């Protein structure tokens, strides 16, 4: 049977949006694995604690507007780490503008 986990790569300055997205996922998937990752930006530990998420605050910014091959590999390493932690058959990448309906 398929199971799903979530990886959320939160953007700088979008803490309110991040909180709403995490709450939305938890509405439908209250116990599923969820890794919340701050891209060298806001402290989201309060959101993670409130919503039972693993939390990582990265020391280096990898997202927009700075893309290069080394940063892409580092980004993939973050995603791989979440996949190893998840222990599920599927993982969904969440961002601050992703809204799920079930």
Image (spheres, helix red, strand yellow):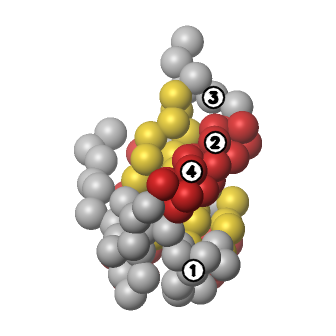
Q: Nearer the viewer, residue 102 or 77?
A: 77
- Residue 83: % across, % down: 64, 38
Q: Residue at x 59, y 85 (%)?
A: 43
**Which residue is found at the position 50% from the left and 68% from the top?**
62
In the displayed orientation, state which residue is furthest to the front: 69
Which residue is denoted by mark 3 in the rendering?
88
For residue 61, side relative to residue 31 (left or right) = left
Whether residue 37 is visible:
yes
Counting residues from the N terminus, which is met first, the one under dot 1 or under dot 2? Answer: 1
**Classed neighbour count for the residue bearing mark 1: other residues with Cα under 10 Å, few (<14), some (14–19), many (≥20):** some
Q: Name the residue under label 2.
A: 80
Give the CA separation, mark 1 to mark 2.
18 Å
Q: How crowded is mark 4: few (under 14 residues within 10 Å), some or many (20 or more)?
A: few
Q: In this view, does 9 lie above or below 80?
A: below
Q: Do the residues labelled 1 and 4 touch (CB within 8 Å)?
A: no
Q: Mark 1 points at which residue?
A: 40
Q: Which of marks 4 and 3 is nearer the N terminus?
A: 4
Q: Can see residue 51?
A: no
Could you say whether the residue bearing mark 3 is in a helix, strand or loop? Answer: loop
- Report the front residue among 68 and 41: 68
Question: What is the CA distance from the residue labelled 3 to the residue labelled 2?
Answer: 13 Å
Mark toward the start of the polypeptide (3 vs 1): 1
**Spatial separation of the CA atoms under disc 1 and disc 4:** 16 Å
Name the residue located 53 percent from the left edge and 86 percent from the top edge: 42
Calculate the distance from the C-alpha at mark 2 to the C-alpha at mark 4.
10 Å
Across and down, in percent, residue 21 comes to 37, 63
User: Which sits earlier in the primary sequence, circle 2 or circle 4?
Assistant: 4
């Amino acid at each position: 049977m398929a199971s799903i986990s979530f990886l959320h790569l939160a953007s700088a300055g979008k803490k309110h949006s991040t909180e709403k997205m995490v709450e939305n996922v938890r509405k439908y998937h209250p116990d599923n694995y969820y890794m919340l990752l701050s891209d060298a930006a806001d402290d989201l530990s309060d959101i993670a604690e409130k919503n039972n998420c693993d939390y990582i605050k990265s020391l280096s910014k990898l997202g927009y507007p700075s893309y290069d091959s080394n940063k892409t590999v580092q980004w993939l390493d973050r995603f791989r780490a979440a996949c190893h932690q998840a222990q599920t058959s599927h993982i969904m990448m969440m961002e601050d503008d992703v809204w799920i309906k079930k």
